Image: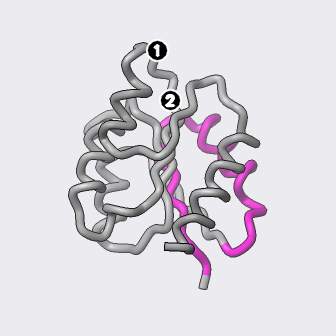
Amino acid sequence: MPRTVLIVEDTESTAVTLEIALDSLSGVNLRMVAGGDEAWQFVQRESVSAIITDLNMPRMDGFELIERVRRAERGARVPIIVVSGDTSPDTPERVRRLGADAYFAKPYSPAAVRETLERLLHESTQT
């Protein structure tokens, strides 16, 4: 059964870059949404194996999305990777405190995001 990875990104070029980098992952079904509110609705309806999210999005930002996912029973152990252009020096620590598993500042290495996702998916199947 394929594992669903939800990509939450409102910038089309970043979403496409992530999709290209992750598309060939074996046993992974990529789903794309443009904002935190859409992601939250998706997570409530569907089971997800991992989330890759931006932070600065309209209606619901990535910070709130991470908080909501971590408070939800089903989302407590879902790996969350943040890919963001947020330039605040406090952001990496803030997202870790909220429960994100990894943080990549833009510009980022799509290969590094892929490697991290593969590792987190593997670790989540071991527990």
Query: Is label 1 in a helix, a strand or a loop?
Result: loop
The percent position of residue 8, horizontal first and vertical second, equals: 47, 47
Q: Nearer the viewer, residue 22 or 58?
A: 22
Q: In the rendered structure, does residue 17 fall within the stretch colored magenta? A: yes
The percent position of residue 105, horizontal first and vertical second, equals: 56, 26
| Quadrant that contains the N terminus | bottom right
7, above or below 63, in the image:
below
Q: Which residues are magenta?
A: 2-27
In this view, the residue farthest toward the front is 127
Q: CA distance from mark 1 to mark 2?
A: 8 Å
- Disc assigned to residue 84: 2
10, above or below 106, in the image:
below
Give the side of residue 37 with respect to residue 6, left or right: left
Q: Nearer the viewer, residue 104 or 6?
A: 104
Q: How many marks?
A: 2
Q: Which residue does the image show at 50% across and 29% down from the upper left?
A: 84
Give the side of residue 92 with respect to residue 83, left or right: left
The percent position of residue 19, horizontal first and vertical second, equals: 67, 51
Q: Quadrant of residue 120?
A: bottom right
**Amino acid at the residue labelled 2:** Ser
Q: In the rendered structure, does residue 50 fall within the stretch colored magenta? A: no
Query: Is label 2 in a helix, a strand or a loop?
Result: strand
Circle 1 residues within 10 Å: few <14, some 14–19, many ≥20: few
Give the side of residue 90 with respect to residue 3, left or right: left
Circle 2 residues within 10 Å: few <14, some 14–19, many ≥20: many
- Disc assigned to residue 87: 1
**Amino acid at the residue labelled 1:** Thr
Q: Which residue does the image show at 62% across and 54% down from the upper left?
A: 117
